[in-house]
Image (spheres, grey):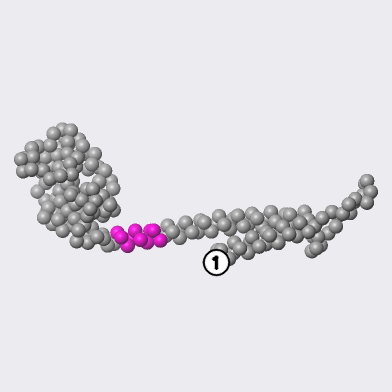
Amino acid sequence: MRRRLSTYHLFTVLLLCARIISSSSFTAPKSKHHYHRRKSAINVEPSIIGGIVVATGATAAWWIGGAKDRENKANYAEYEALQRERESLAFVQPKDEWLEEELSAYNGENDESGPILLAVKGDVFNVWKGRNFYGPGAEYHIMAGRDATRFLAKNKLEEETEEEKKIELNIAERANLEVWYWTIKNKYQFVGNLSGYDPKSTEM
């Protein structure tokens, strides 16, 4: 409201100055070499008034631009505060080792604002920032609250059969897993190690 009012006042001054200039005029010359310039109503040369208009216009432009910057900063501060609140709600205490059964409690279904955990290559990550990917109803929700290593290696979003689980990952799948692993590692918070993980099952 204050910004709108101030902008209104600036444009009012501009309009007033424009009216003053329009009311200032020159009389017809008395002779070939002599003319008389009539003063404006406030006894100020029109050229000076023109300068005032230009300066006032510049001030108005500066104020409008500054108001936009202030609005952007306020919006960013609000966004930062919201992010801190979300991070606080999704916090989970890191620990040295997690059982895979423990991860199931953090699949995002019990608390829509809480942490979402998944394991990749023996590392456990809190992927709450990717809730739109791993939360309930999202495309990769099948990986939440469990060891997602083989899903990522095979680029599959469906459960393996018991027979399929016994088949070791091939070199192409292990290479694919490396890409996924570093993507997740660089994006999400590491919160511990997965108990029982065998590094040989995924090494290159």
Q: Which residue is mark 1?
A: 2
Q: Residue at x 12, y 37 (%)?
A: 169
Identify which residue is drawn at 32% across, 62% down: 85
Please rate how many residues cluster around mark 1, counting C-alpha atoms within 10 Å: few if below 14, some from 14 to 19, many from 20.
Answer: few
Give yes or no for residue 194 being in the magenta stretch: no
* Quadrant that contains the C terminus: top left
- SS at badge 1: helix
Instruction: Kindly report the secondary structure that dominates the magenta region of the rendered protein.
Output: helix
- Looking at the rendered structure, the number of numbered marks drawn on it comes to 1
Q: Residue 98's x, y, as percent?
A: 14, 54
Q: Position of residue 10 (x, y in %)?
A: 63, 61
Q: Is residue 203 above or below residue 14?
A: above
Identify the amino acid type marked 1: Arg
| Residue situated in front as seen by the camera: 103 or 138 | 138
Asked if residue 184 is positioned above or below residue 48 in the image, the reply reads above
> Magenta part of the protein: which range?
78-87
**Quarter residue 174 falls in:** top left
Q: Residue at x 55, y 63 (%)?
A: 3
Q: Is residue 96 visible?
A: no
Camera-side residue: 16 or 190? 16
Point 37% across, 61% down: residue: 81
